[in-house]
Image (cartoon, rainbow, N blue to C red):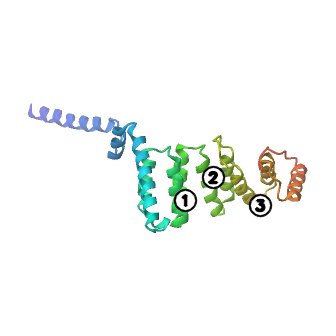
Amino acid sequence: MLLCWLGVAAMSHLLLGQHQRLQAQKPIIRYQDLFLDLLGEGRTLLARLLWFQADLYHEQQDAAGVATFQQKEVIPLLRMVTYLDPSFVDAYDVIAYDLDEGFGQTRQAIDLVEEGLLYNPKSYALNFRRALLAEKQRDSISAMLYGQRAYDSEEEDVNKFLPVKIMRRAALRMRDPWWGVQVADLLTRLRVADPDPELTRYYRQLLQGKGVKTGSGPAG
């Protein structure tokens, strides 16, 4: 009887261990996420208050004669704004500008803008900022793509000529006829004169010789 009881106990222990392994793993819950969930819709209001506080602090520092890029306390406030309200495009844009221009952290600025674009893929400001950063790194393809997205933005009261300027410089570096013609067409839509019509005409002739129509894709 003793041996039988010990055998049952051993089997129960094995079955318990197997049962625990088969159970679904509980997701990791961060205290930060719980806190933000508790805030609910108040997150947006708190984000606006922090933005106001950062702007007020910036004005005070300016009045005290502190240079803009020495006001390091502003960035953490703005970063908290993006955590609370990821749709707050201006906060992402200002931080990215400060990181790039003030602290020379272009890679970190790019990462931040790309995070903002995950939540705001059609934002003119963030796509334009990403195109600017790509141009700074001589990443012509990214400058083209993000410049095009900024141009295609449906937001009102934006300057669509600025992303086209970035695209034109990128097209010249790439020496790609298709992109060159695309940029020239965009300038025409904006009623801006083509700065190099001879080059555009040459590109069109090249594309026609290859049987490539405008708008069909980059020339290979």
Q: Counting residues from the N terminus, which is met first, the one under dot 2 or under dot 1?
A: 1
Q: Is residue 62 left or right of residue 120?
A: left
- What separation in Å lies between label 2 and label 3 (alpha carbons)? 19 Å
Q: In the rendered image, which residue does mark 3 sit on?
A: 172
Q: Residue furthest left?
A: 2
Quarter of the image where one finds residue 29: top left
Up/down of 62 relative to 143, above or below: below
Q: Secondary structure at mark 3?
A: helix
Q: Residue at horizontal 59%, vertical 50%?
A: 125
The answer to the question of whether label 2 and label 1 lie on touching residues, with beta carbons closer than 8 A, is no
Q: Residue at horizontal 54%, vertical 45%?
A: 118
Q: In the rendered image, which residue does mark 2 sit on?
A: 128
Q: In the rendered image, which residue does mark 1 sit on?
A: 97
- What separation in Å lies between label 3 and label 1 (alpha carbons)? 25 Å
Q: Residue at horizontal 41%, vertical 61%?
A: 73
Q: Quadrant of the N terminus?
A: top left
Q: Counting residues from the N terminus, which is met first, the one under dot 3 or under dot 1?
A: 1
Instruction: Name the kind of residue labelled 3 in the image.
Output: Leu
Instruction: Name the kind of residue labelled 2 in the image.
Output: Phe
Q: Position of residue 109 (x, y in %)?
A: 53, 58
Q: Is residue 91 visible?
A: yes
Q: Position of residue 68 (x, y in %)?
A: 49, 65
Quarter of the image where one finds residue 25: top left
- What separation in Å lies between label 2 and label 1 (alpha carbons)? 12 Å
The answer to the question of whether label 2 and label 3 lie on touching residues, with beta carbons closer than 8 A, is no
Instruction: Name the kind of residue labelled 1 in the image.
Output: Tyr
Up/down of 214 relative to 54, above or below: above
Q: Is residue 80 left or right of residue 99?
A: left
Q: Position of residue 90 (x, y in %)?
A: 52, 50
Q: Position of residue 54 (x, y in %)?
A: 43, 55
